[in-house]
Amino acid sequence: MASRVGCFGCHGPGGRVGKRNPRSFKGYIPPWRGRDFNELVRDDEELRRWILDGKIDRLESNPLARYFTGRQVIQMPAYRDILNDEEVEALITYIHWLQNQEL
Ligand code: HEC
């Protein structure tokens, strides 16, 4: 599912290692686990917004964060028109599962 819609092309195989992203805040695309993820995604509501809109209000309303998210070379695409509810829920389930795995 995630590979079919292209998530891994940016978030790395299995969503584990993001590729480089010049001019972004950290210099790479955030993977779906670890400290960056916990900063960027506080709960499932935010996770859903990331996937549907490619951004979340909490960062958009923070001028420093917006500076980087607007300027980075690679942007997170919005999947609102591409995925149905079931597919979004499947991704959320996968991402939860991933976070409980040992490396
Ligand atoms: C074209 C590259 C690209 C693709 C394809 C992509 N993303 Fe992203 N994604 C990004 C970037 C860049 C960010 C960081 C955005 C920011 O900081 O504004 C991000 C952020 C995220 C985040 C929030 C933070 C984190 O730690 O990862 C989630 C969750 C996420 N993406 C999920 C997905 C899912 C699910 C898919 C597939 C349906 C997907 N992405 C496809 C580039 C991509």
Image (cartoon, rainbow, N blue to C red):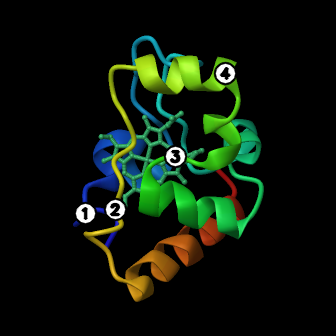
Report the side of 15 relative to 84 (left or right). Answer: right
Residue 5: image tag: 1
Image coordinates of residue 78 in percent, x first then y, are: 36, 54
Residue 55: image tag: 3
Q: Residue furthest bottom?
A: 86
Dot 4 or dot 2: first in sequence order is 4
Figure check: 2 above or below 73 = below
Mark pair 1, 4: CA separation:
30 Å
Image coordinates of residue 71 in percent, x first then y, are: 42, 17
Residue at the location (61% across, 36% down)? 60
Mark pair 2, 1: CA separation:
9 Å
Q: Secondary structure at mark 3?
A: loop
Of tags 1 and 3, which is closer to the observer?
A: 3
Dot 1 or dot 4: first in sequence order is 1
- Mark 3 sits near ligand 1, with its Cβ under 8 Å away: yes
- Mark 1 sits near ligand 1, with its Cβ under 8 Å away: yes
Q: Nearer the viewer, residue 76 or 21?
A: 76
Q: Residue furthest top?
A: 23
Q: Would you name the residue on which mark 2 appears? A: 79
Judge whether residue 56 can be spotted in this image. Answer: yes
Of tags 4 and 2, which is closer to the observer?
A: 4
Residue 63: image tag: 4
The three-letter code of the residue at mark 3 reads Lys
The three-letter code of the residue at mark 4 reads Pro
The three-letter code of the residue at mark 1 reads Val
Report the side of 22 relative to 32 (left or right). Answer: left
